[in-house]
């Protein structure tokens, strides 16, 4: 079962974001359209991240958002459209090709 990511409010100067280990079963978060995700890959291999799409994009295709986080790199998403990525339960779901040394954070500013 997917593990909930707490969305952190980033306000003011000096706010210190925290990251959590990516869950082997995947993660999910409450998507209000203002949340960005950040992934930090501490592994020596790239890791593929898949964000599940539930409705078609504006071109009529229902395709997931899939990207690789290079070894030793960080990747930040833009806010994810709730109309495309949010399930009826209000959450957006994420899976990973590998979770060893991968951390993730969900942030709202």
Image (cartoon, helix red, strand yellow):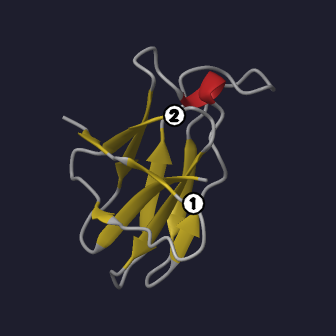
**Could you classify mark 2 by the number of other residues whose Cα lies within 10 Å: few (under 14), some (14-19), or many (20 or more)?**
many
**Could you classify mark 1 by the number of other residues whose Cα lies within 10 Å: few (under 14), some (14-19), or many (20 or more)?**
few
Residue at point 61% right, 56% down?
A: 77
Q: Is residue 40 above or below residue 94?
A: below
Residue at point 40% right, 44% down?
A: 94
Residue at point 39% right, 61% down?
A: 104
How many callouts does the rendering have?
2
Q: Is residue 63 above or below residue 22?
A: above
Q: Residue furthest front?
A: 12
**Image quadrant where residue 103 sits:** bottom left
Question: Which image quadrant: the N terminus?
Answer: top left
| Rendered image: mark on residue 22 | none
**Image quadrant where residue 56 sits:** top right
Q: Is residue 65 above or below residue 20?
A: above
Q: Residue furthest right?
A: 59
In this rendering, position of residue 87 left or right of residue 59: left
Residue labelled with disc 1: 11
Tag 1 secondary structure: loop
Q: Position of residue 54 (x, y in %)?
A: 53, 23
Q: CA distance from mark 1 to mark 2?
A: 18 Å
Q: Nearer the viewer, residue 97 or 13?
A: 13
Q: Are marks 1 and 2 in contact (CB under 8 Å)?
A: no
Q: Is residue 2 above or below residue 67?
A: above
**Residue 62 shows up from this direction:** no
Residue labelled with disc 2: 31
Residue at point 50% right, 76% down?
A: 70
**Residue 36 shows up from this direction:** yes
Q: Position of residue 67 (x, y in %)?
A: 56, 58
């Amino acid at each position: 079962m997917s593990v909930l990511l707490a969305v952190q409010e980033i306000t003011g100067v000096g706010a210190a974001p925290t990251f959590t280990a990516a869950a082997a079963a995947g993660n999910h978060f409450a998507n209000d359209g203002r949340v960005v995700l950040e992934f930090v890959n501490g592994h020596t291999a790239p890791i593929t991240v898949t964000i599940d799409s539930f409705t078609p994009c504006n071109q009529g295709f229902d395709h997931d958002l899939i990207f690789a986080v290079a070894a030793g790199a960080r990747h930040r998403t833009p806010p994810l459209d709730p109309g495309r990525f949010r399930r009826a339960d209000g959450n957006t779901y994420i899976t990973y090709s590998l979770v060893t040394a991968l951390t993730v954070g969900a942030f709202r500013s």
